[in-house]
Amino acid sequence: MAIPDPDAEESLLAEIARTIPGADDVRRVKQLLAAWWRYAGVRNAAGAVVDSERFLAERSSLGLLELPVSVARSVIELEFAILNQRRPAAPPAPAVSPPATARAPVREASPAPVAADRAKAIVLSGLVVFFSLAVGAAMLGATLVGAIHLPGGAAALVSPWRGWLAITTGVGGVVAATIVGARTGAGRRLVGPRIGLGGLAVTGVGLLGGSIATAGLGGAVLISGAALGARRRDA
């Protein structure tokens, strides 16, 4: 949610719960709005249209929507209306324009920021595609395979699709980082991220197979890879 003030956030959530039937679960409402703002930010950065109906349809089709579609739609619309009411008015424009002789010369925009923005949009678009594929593969794995059983493991520690999401994200990330490293020559800098992503996949296997030891080992590898990646980035 784009509300840095905790008091304002609590006030907004209370108003949503009071106004919209079925939106009284504060945790689910916060998760929905956080997912909506992430989606809107990525779409906006990529220069794409931000469409709440498309967001609701995609999230509902994946079984990730926190509330019924009609309730979720009303929550997003009401939050938008409340935030617009709270937005401070823009300061009035000066009544008199400066003389023409005092105006700064017009300078053409440098192509460097434009290229940087374009590269950022391409990266964000690639991340959206990657995670969309990872989520789709996770849902497919949960549907076709479900939980797995490791030696000494009990029941799955999380919902099957969550475990599969960790596995597909980790494996897919390792493959993507390996390809990027080979094409750009940044293989050494990506060693840490590859280790961390491999740890994420192992964690998913442990969670899916009900093995706390395996999940803990994967978590330790994930943290080690992240630390190694941060150290090499700062070097």
Image: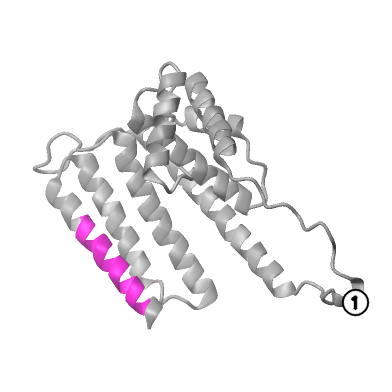
> Is residue 13 shown to the viewer in this render?
yes
- The quarter of the picture where the C terminus appears is bottom left
Element at badge 1? helix
Q: Position of residue 136 (x, y in %)?
A: 46, 39
> Is residue 143 shown to the viewer in this render?
no
Apparent side of residue 164 relative to residue 77 in the rendered image (left or right): left
Residue lying at the far right of the rendered structure? 100
Magenta residues, as a range?
218-232
| Displayed quadrant of residue 52 | top right
Residue positioned 50% across, 39% down in the render: 36
| 227 is within the stretch colored magenta | yes
Q: Position of residue 60 (x, y in %)?
A: 48, 27
Q: Nearer the viewer, residue 113 or 24?
A: 24
Query: Taking 93 as reference, is 224 above or below it?
Result: below
Residue lying at the far left of the rendered structure? 152
Q: Position of residue 23 (x, y in %)?
A: 41, 22
Residue positioned 45% across, 26% down in the render: 16
| Displayed quadrant of residue 112 | bottom right
Q: Nearer the viewer, residue 24 or 169?
A: 24
Label 1 environment density (alpha carbons within 10 Å; few <14, some 14–19, many ≥20): few
Apparent side of residue 65 relative to residue 42 in the rendered image (left or right): left
Q: Nearer the viewer, residue 139 or 46?
A: 46
Q: Position of residue 108 (x, y in %)?
A: 82, 73
The three-letter amino acid code for the residue at tag 1 is Thr
Main secondary structure type of the part rendered in magenta = helix
| 4 is within the stretch colored magenta | no
The residue under label 1 is: 101
Query: Taking 65 as reference, is 96 above or below it?
Result: below
Residue lying at the far top of the rendered structure? 21
Apparent side of residue 111 relative to residue 136 in the rendered image (left or right): right
Residue positioned 50% across, 22% down in the render: 69
Residue positioned 85% across, 63% down in the render: 97
